[in-house]
Structure formats: C-alpha cells, structure tokens
Amino acid sequence: KLKRNLESPSKPDQVISLAPSHPFYKEINEVVANHIRRLMTENVEEKVDWVCIADQGDMKVFKRELEENGIPIDPMKAVCTVKGITGHEVCQYFWAFDTRMEWEATLDLSRAVEWLSDDTFISNNVIKRVWPASQRDACFWSHIRHISNKNDETPDCWIVVNYSCEHPECPPNKYVRITMNVALICETIIEPPANESTITRDNITCKITYTADVNPGGWAPASVLRAVYKREYPKFLKRFTSFVIDKTKDKEILF
Ligand code: 6CM
C-alpha cells in the first residue's frame, strides 16, 4: 500500500480509502462521526464539570475528572488557534508516522504494525515510564480524513483519530496496555488579502480542537497522573504546533 507523501501530497480525499469490506471500516466511520458530532454540540468553556487546567491565551486545556474502578480516566480537551498553518498541514503532520518521533516527547518508541490503506495504519507506541507506575504501551489505528462542507450541517475540516485496537503482531504482554480515543480536528480560517492578491501564511489561521480519552490500564496513582497531564498536554500542543510551523514555513501552503 502507498504511504501518503508529505513532500508531494496526493489530492485531498473526500472519502475513506479503506475498503468497505475491511473489518475496521465500520468502526472508523462511527468513531469519526462521533467526534464530528461532539465537536458541533459540545462547548467545554460553557460546561460546569470541565475545568481549565492551562490558559495561555491562544491555547486552553480542559479536563473533566472521572474515575473508573479507582483509575483516573479524565477526558481532556484543548482548543487552540495557530497563525500561519492550515488544518490540512496540522493533521497531515499529526497523522504522519515517519515524523511522529520528531515532536512526540511522551514516547520511547513508535513502530508501524500494519498499513491498512493510504489513510489508515496501525502502530505500537511505548510510552515513557512515569515513576512509580509500570511502563505503558498502546496499539491504535490512525486515520486521517478531509470532511468537506457539502452542506451547512458539517464544518469543512480535517480530522485525525488515534483509536485503540488489537493486532496479532502487537499483543499486550510486555507493558501495561493503555486504551485511548484521541482526535485532532482542524478548521482553517482565511482572511482574504486586500486587492485580490495571493493568500500568504499571514492570511491563514488554524483552529485546532484536540480531545483525548485515555484509560491508563492498570493501577496509576491519580495525583501523579493528573500532574503529568497538566504538564504534558500543554507542552505537547506547543511543541507539536511549533514543529508544524517550522516544517511548513518555506513550503507552499497545503490547503
Ligand atoms: O496525542 C498525542 N500523541 C499521539 C501520537 O503519538 C497519540 C498518543 C497517544 C499516547 C497518549 C499517552 C498519554 C499519556 C499516558 C500516560 C500514562 C502513564 C501512566 C503513568 C501513571 C502515573 O495520540 C499526544 C499525547 C500527549 C500526551 C501528554
């Protein structure tokens, strides 16, 4: 299967390139649709049970404290706006496997397990150990999709979903297996330049919504985990978006 190439990206797909007969086809479509629905109906800034844990002006991170059998599974949600990059660029780099370790600071290693199609692959990711808990890993499919605004009911956006799955070549036998449902959804805002001149990076802004529902698997001390999240999620957003700005600054804009 062909890998999507960042240097000469293929025409944006409007549809899933995974075959409808694939065992993950239904799940991927349902998970993507749920994220889009959540995006359109949920405004964390208006909800009382969501707490803002980082506010850096253009970037805000929220959490909702939740426990399951004594294990914290706090859903996280972040919203940020970044100038000079498009939603397509942000999603392409969040999804791209070959550059993941250039911006990922929470992983020890990432291994591609199987390419399902040119928009979906499965990877195994070993997360850096957090003392005093055991080391964790995750196995998930990563799917990228363009959703065009054919009608007023859906926004024109790019989305990447990282969603836990099982794979015979990735058994959960060495580390504690975390499970997750992570989505990065981007909308591009274009400020029309004066005198119908060409759009430059000064005219574009990307609105990013990031959500992460992570179950750390086995025992994890809540106070340590919550301290890690408070520190690491804002750090990730800053580091990742700076990475995209740096990678794209001398390139043509990928709308
Ligand atoms: O979304 C992020 N990265 C993606 C690409 O790698 C992918 C990553 C998922 C891993 C999420 C790990 C969350 C951290 C879990 C720590 C559990 C340790 C238990 C310790 C108990 C004390 O979606 C960026 C992820 C940024 C995470 C801060």
Image (spheres, grey):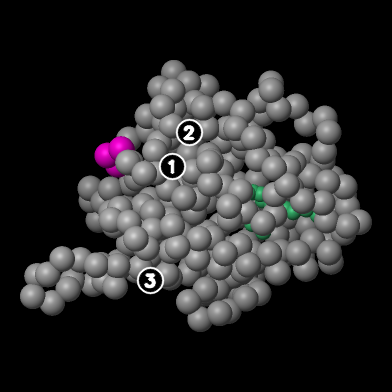
Residue at x-position 69% and y-position 21%: 168
Quarter occupied by the C terminus: bottom left
- The answer for how far apart the CA atoms under marks 3 and 2 are is 28 Å
Residue 11 lies in the magenta-colored region: yes
In this view, the residue farthest toward the top is 21
On residue 144, which mark appears?
1
Residue 35 in the image, given as x and y percentages of width and height: 48, 50
Residue 201 in the image, given as x and y percentages of width and height: 29, 67
Q: Secondary structure at mark 2?
A: strand
- The answer for how far apart the CA atoms under marks 2 and 1 are is 7 Å
Which residue does the numbered mark 2 point to in the structure image? Answer: 120
In this view, the residue farthest toward the front is 250
Q: Residues within 10 Å of mark 1 (few under 14, many from 20)?
A: many
Q: Say what amino acid the circle numbered 2 marks.
A: Thr
Find out whether the residues at labels 2 and 1 contact each other: C-beta distance under 8 Å. Answer: yes
* Among the 4 quarters of the image, the one containing residue 51: bottom right
* Residue in front for this viewpoint, 74 or 89: 89
Left or right of 196, for residue 190: right
Find out whether the residues at labels 3 and 2 contact each other: C-beta distance under 8 Å. Answer: no
Q: Earlier in the sequence, mark 1 or mark 3?
A: 3
